Each structure stands twice: as C-alpha cells, then as structure tokens.
Amino acid sequence: MADLKGVSLTLLMGPVAVMPVPAVVTHAFESAQVTRGVDQRSGFQISFTYSKTSPIATQMLPAGFFDPMIRVILVATLNGLPHVLADGPIKRQDVAASPNPGENKLTITGEDVTSYMDLISLDGMPYPAMPPFARVAMMLAKYAMFGVIPATIPTPFSFTASPTEKYAQQKGTDYSYAKKLADDAKYAFYATPGPMPGTNTVYWGPEIRVGVPQPAITIDMDQASNIDALNFSADGNAAELTYAFVKIAGFSVPLPMPPMSLLRPPLSARPLITTKLRLLDTERKSTPEVLEALLAGGARAEPMSATGSLDTQRYGTPLDARQLVGVRGAGLAHDGLWYVKQVTHTLGRGSWKQAFQLAREGLISNVPAVRP
C-alpha cells in the first residue's frame, strides 16, 4: 500500500488470482492514471522508478512479474472508503533505462476486464432461439474466474426467430460480437470494476441517465468552491434529429424521434436548435425493428459539453463516469445537471486529481437547484 496525502493506494497483481505486490514495488511506485468514459474501453497506466540493482530489475522483470496479460487491480481509499479504479490485464510494458543511478522507469499499460473477452475468435458459435441480451449473458458466463457479474437488459422490441428457420452465429471474439450487438441496439457495453476488489460488473443495456446526482461541481462560490476552472462549449454539428419512414395503412409516413426517453430525460430547459436531420435506413426492417431503431437513433445529440479538473480530496469523493452531476456557480446558462462522459484519474505521491468531460443537450437548468 502506497501512502498518499489523505489517500492510500493498494496495488494487487497476479495471473488470475491476485495478491498485494511486494514492498519493493510499492516503494518504486511513481504515478498511476486511469481513464473511464462512454464509447471506450477503460484503461490504466502505472509507472515505477527503480535502480538497476533493485529486485524489479534483477528478479521480477526477468521472471515475468510485469508481463502482458498479468492481472492488475488498483484500489484507492479516500476517507476510509475504498474505490476500485482498475481491474484488468497488462497489455504493454515499457522500460526506459537511465544513465542516472536509480532513475530507470517501468511503465505498464492495461485495459479493463473486457480485454480478456477479446483474445479468441469464435466464428460460427451458434445461439439458437436466443435474443441478443441472452447471447451476451451466455458469453459473459465464461469469465466468472475474473469476477465478472453479468448485467444484461433485453431490448424493448426483442424478438426471437424459430431455430428451424434461422439462428444467430457469432462473428469474431466475444467482445467484438457483444459490442456489435450493443451498437445495433444503440446500447452501452462496458465493465465497471468493483464494488469489491476482484469483482467486475459488465453491463449490456440502455444508457441510463437517471438517478441521484453526485455532489455538485461548484465554482466561484467562495468557500463552497471545489474546482478551479470549468470550460463550456456548444457544438451545433452535434445537434441532430433522427427520423424514419413507417408504413401506416399502406402509406410511408415520416416519424421523427427526439433524443430523449424514460431512461434519458432532458437535462436542460432549452435544447439547442437541431441543425441536422438524419434518415435511418429502415426500408427492409420489420415494424418492431423500425421502432427499436427510432428509439435508439436519437440518443447521440449532445451539443453541449464541459471540461475541467478537480482535486478529489477537495471535492470529497471520486467523480464517477456514466452518472449525473450537478454544476452550480457557472451562471444561468450552464448551471444544473450534466452527464459525466469521461473521467481520468491521475494519482501521485501527495495528490489525486481528476480531469472530466460533461455533456447535455442544451442550456439553462430544468431543476430549481442541485444538491451541494
């Protein structure tokens, strides 16, 4: 365990089962960076500094202690509460030799637990009479040894063809196939480490933007401020409306779908004006498939974005991606609730910083206030 200012960092490693790293590795720890975000696989990078006579150089590196596919779990404890930041295999190892004594640098880079699903191509694996969510659940069951807890949600208009007529066959690895099924349904597919070290929740389902918001990001409010800077942008090219032609009484009728749903309510009172119209290709699809495409097709219109950074100890808790957060003190146009699209944790001796990216569909808060 590496002691940081107000924070403790625990590093566990092993082929499948993990254990705390030796003291020599803890003492060599320099920094760690973990990135989580929407539409991307989570990743981590950890750096160590050591001498050429260190056991890291003379024993661990030659023995494969830091080799690719070694599992790494990173746990940060803040105010007595542990937070699992990363769990997955090393994918790359970089060593920088230095002419200065004791300044050799080892950097390991890895990905989340879904990387284990991207190793073997299983082309042709049959899934008779199984809708997409059931196929994904069956694939995830193979990774129970890595603590994978499946969480799969059926699509609103899922239907199953008779196996005597046709049945689905896998193309590619488990990860690529599950990701394709998610993209087809406009679903999210991602892994969240935790809640306990050694477990991972792998979610396949709609992107959920409801729930209790995280503590507010506060700026320009004297002692209540917990952030130094916050930047906002409005991108008109991202404001689009999707529509499709639906057969009604034998006639093709255009049906638009606004970018909102029960699981994706609007976060602003004044959405930005739509600048693009996008026609969905639904000519050869059945009515349930057309409705499903319409429900999912408008889920990407987020012309408003915000970026900033914060000190986790000052903020009081880690800011999590894929959740709501309040903003206050930024003015009438930008206060209110936002969706956290990406968070990058940067940990070093004496600090735990986070850079983040927020998103929503427009200006002006649609809630009277956000909780501090």
Image: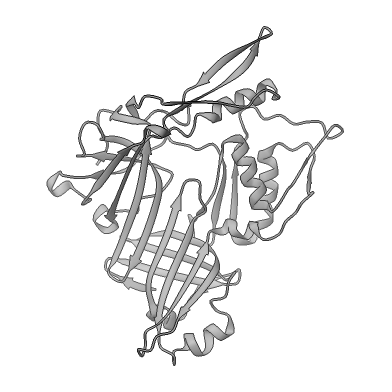
Answer with the quarter of the image where residue 165 lies: top right
Outermost residue to the bottom: 53
Q: Position of residue 112 (x, y in %)?
A: 53, 58
Quarter of the picture holding the N terminus? bottom left
For this view, does 160 lie left or right of residue 333?
right
Please determine whether, in this image, residue 91 is positioned above or below residue 244: below
On the rendered image, what quadrant is the C terminus found in? top left
- Residue 228, position in %: x, y? 21, 52
Residue at image position (64%, 56%) is: 117
- Residue at x 43%, y 44% (from the top left corner): 322
Of all residues, the one furthest to the top in this rendering is 249
Q: Is residue 19 depicted above or below 88 in this figure?
A: below
Along the viewing direction, whichever of 279 and 166 lies nearer the viewer:
279
Residue 339 location, x and y as percent?
A: 38, 40
Q: Is residue 196 above or below residue 70?
A: above
Give the farthest residue toward the left.
222
Q: To which quarter of the image does residue 235 belong? A: top left
Which is more toward the observer, 350 or 277?
Answer: 277
The image position of residue 23, as x and y in percent, is: 42, 82
Q: Tell whether 318 sits left or right of 157.
A: left
